[in-house]
Amino acid sequence: MAEQRGRTYHRNRVAETLREEISAMLEGQLSDPRINFGYVSEVVMAPGGKSARIYVAVDGDSKDEEDMLAGLEAARGYIRHQLLQRMGVRHIPELFFQVDHSEPVRARIDELLGRVERRNRQKERLQQESAQAAATMKPASSGHE
């Protein structure tokens, strides 16, 4: 049975609010030194609304990612308490933090597509130049004067 449109809309609104509020907390309200430069890229709510997976993009290497996750796991209770006060709701979903690896992959894909585009432009330019050179060349005369 398909889920009602209103429930899906509500769950998406809650997920967006969670993303905004947790992002604000990451920007300066969490004092754990392990929580460094990063942002919440996406929040995915479970269909029942009892849990939410928080995808965090981290600027740094795998050590920074591990530290960030450890810091967020340690601050999970504080984050839930703050969300409860800020959002004014009865229930805050259980939060599960995960590193978002989609940004480096997206950047690599963009880099490769840029290379292909530059190659195609260069090939077109060479074809145009050779066509212009062929058009400007005069055919050799076959008769004697």
Image (spheres, rainbow, N blue to C red):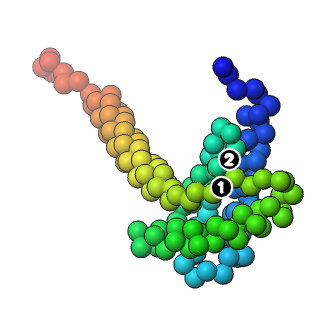
Q: What's the amino acid at mark 1?
A: Glu
Query: What residue is at 66 percent from the left and 20 percent from the top?
Result: 1
Query: What residue is at 77 percent from the left and 44 percent from the top?
Result: 13
Callout count = 2
Position in image of residue 109 (x %, y %): 42, 47
Q: Is residue 16 left or right of residue 100?
A: right
Of the numbered discs 1 and 2, the one sitting upstream in the chain is: 2
Residue sticking out furthest to the right: 88
Residue 46 shows in this picture: yes
> What is the C-alpha distance between the residues marked 1 and 2?
6 Å
Q: Residues within 10 Å of mark 2 (few under 14, many from 20)?
A: few
Query: What residue is at 73 percent from the left and 49 percent from the top?
Result: 16
Position in image of residue 64 (x %, y %): 47, 73
Q: Is residue 103 left or right of residue 92?
A: left
Quick one: 21 or 61, which is closer to the camera? 21
Q: Which residue is mark 1?
A: 94
Position in image of residue 143 (x %, y %): 14, 17
Q: Quadrant of the C terminus?
A: top left
Residue 136 shows in this picture: no
Q: Which mark is residue 50?
A: 2
- Of helix, strand and loop, which one carries label 2? loop
